[in-house]
Image (cartoon, rainbow, N blue to C red):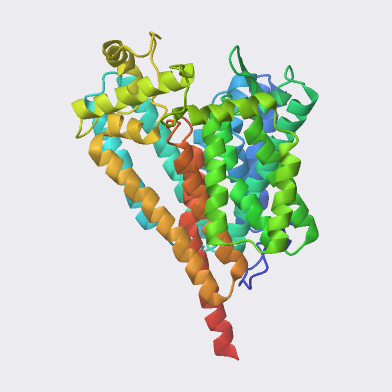
Amino acid sequence: MIESLSTLPETEQKPVKFWNGILPLVLIAVVLGLGVALTVNEVGILALVAILGLLLALSTLTNPDLGLMMFIMVIYVNLSSVLITNYGLPSIAKPLVVLMGVLIVIRGALFRDEFHGWILPAILLGLYSFLGSITLAYASDFALAFNTLVDYLKDAVIAIIIIMLIQRPGSLRRAVWALLLTGLFMGTLSVFQQLTGSFGNDFFGFARVSSSSTTGTRLAGPIGDPNFYAQIMVLIIPLSIDRVWNEKKLILKALAGWAFFVITLTVIFTYSRGAFLALIAALVFMAVKRPPRLPAALLGLAAGLLIFQFVPVNYRERVSTLFDLLPGSGTNGYVDPSVQGRKSENIVAWNMFLDNPILGVGLGNYNAYYEQYSRKLGIDPRREGRSAHNLYLEIAAERGIFGLLLFASIVTLTLVQAFKAEKLFKELGHKSMSDLSALLGISILTYLITAIFLHDAFPRFLWVIVGLAWSAPQCARYASRVAQSKLAKT
């Protein structure tokens, strides 16, 4: 099925023979994996992780597209966190990123792979990390700042790896399908969990829930937080709609439709109001970018009516509280406690920025200062460290104006790349890839909307989409070179 995902003409690499250096790697990996597993006397889960690493290494060396799909799926399903939380294993995220980096170097040396388009984003992400590293000199909580910096560097490298491995249109399409299959997996588990009421079963850590007296049970998936779970799922919805539009094979259209259905329901079952607003905005962006024809509009309406049948009444009531924020809403002075708390968190972030406008208070140090500022403000009765619940205010508070401007530059240039690729593919007559490039841009816009209500707790999911968007123009240029080469031969 993977091979069927690409319909564009591509000059494929010569097949790599299994015996050309691969068999020794297999033997070494197997021996090391078994040795580690037997040494610690935990053959089960450790052997599974060793096998996963082996498969990823072999896939990347012999079929980079398959290796990239596995890499994206492991990252997006939050496997490292699941293994830490449910099985007490150390983090595999950083070793995995290092492994992929080494494999890229090996492919470049052995197979003479060429990697284009990664230098400019690497410079931008490097500057952003350098600016963050400066804050280590004055951060109140150095350990927190340092750990935040290390996590950011890991996420930046993830984006660069994705850009380097996606050089052709087929590779980009397969990477998007990796996201869809991951969303389909998580969404199917979550919807099953919700409809059957099996909240006591976390399905090996991939379907956790969150409960409170005010909101009841909310799906949290492998993330563990319903709002952030909704954030990473709503990003995939535009891409699932795109694949329903543009895939030729009925089975792929059905898979994309299934992904859209369960991911949308999952977002609803998280009860996230911010994700609901982002979903509405994404649908509006898509309608403006690609006005649907009557059959597509009727199909979308039917899908919406079907999904509406599953929407819980208390979720509708929760969404309706958004109107309480409007002037003249007639709420008789009542304010949702969560809205009141976020108001305090946002004002505190703004005050931190005003006190430290150039470089901020230091990476990850908003939490360390929150209680001090909150006590002076007097809005939030909670006496504990809190997060900003607004990505832009958090960046301003922790990294200052330079950090905010640099982040704005990165996301703006990323959007430029996505819509530039849309134009290039359209000029080549590749409508499917043109639409896909545009929808990557809309996915990023969707994230930026959810970021109005959420801080930077799980940034790696943004950088995955950023990596895909930056790779789109180089894929278009590759398709252009192939077209010109074929034209020259005729």
Q: Residue at x 59, y 84 (%)?
A: 486
Residue lying at 70% horizontally and 50% vertically, measured from the top left: 301
Q: Name the spot of residue 147 as percent of width and height, x first.
A: 39, 26
Quarter of the view holding residue 134: top left
Query: Taking 408 as reference, is 455 above or below it?
Result: above
Instruction: Give whichever of 341, 80 is nearer the camera.
Output: 341
Position of 111 compared to 221: left or right? left
Horizontal and vertical percent position of residue 285: 52, 53
* Residue 345 screen position, x and y as percent: 37, 22
Left or right for 130, reference 386: left
Answer left or right for 202 relative to 107: right
Q: Is residue 328 visible?
A: yes
Residue sitting at x 48%, y 65%: 421
**For residue 214, above or below residue 435:** above
Residue 98 visible, this angle: no
Quadrant occupied by the N terminus: bottom right
Up the image or down, 474 lies above or below 450; here it is: below
Q: Nearer the viewer, residue 119 or 77?
A: 77
Query: Which of the 4 image quarters holds residue 137?
Result: top left
Could you tell me which quadrant the C terminus lies in?
bottom right
Q: Name the residue: 70% across, 52% down.
A: 300
Q: Nearer the viewer, residue 294 or 110?
A: 294
Give coordinates of residue 6: x percent, y percent.
67, 64
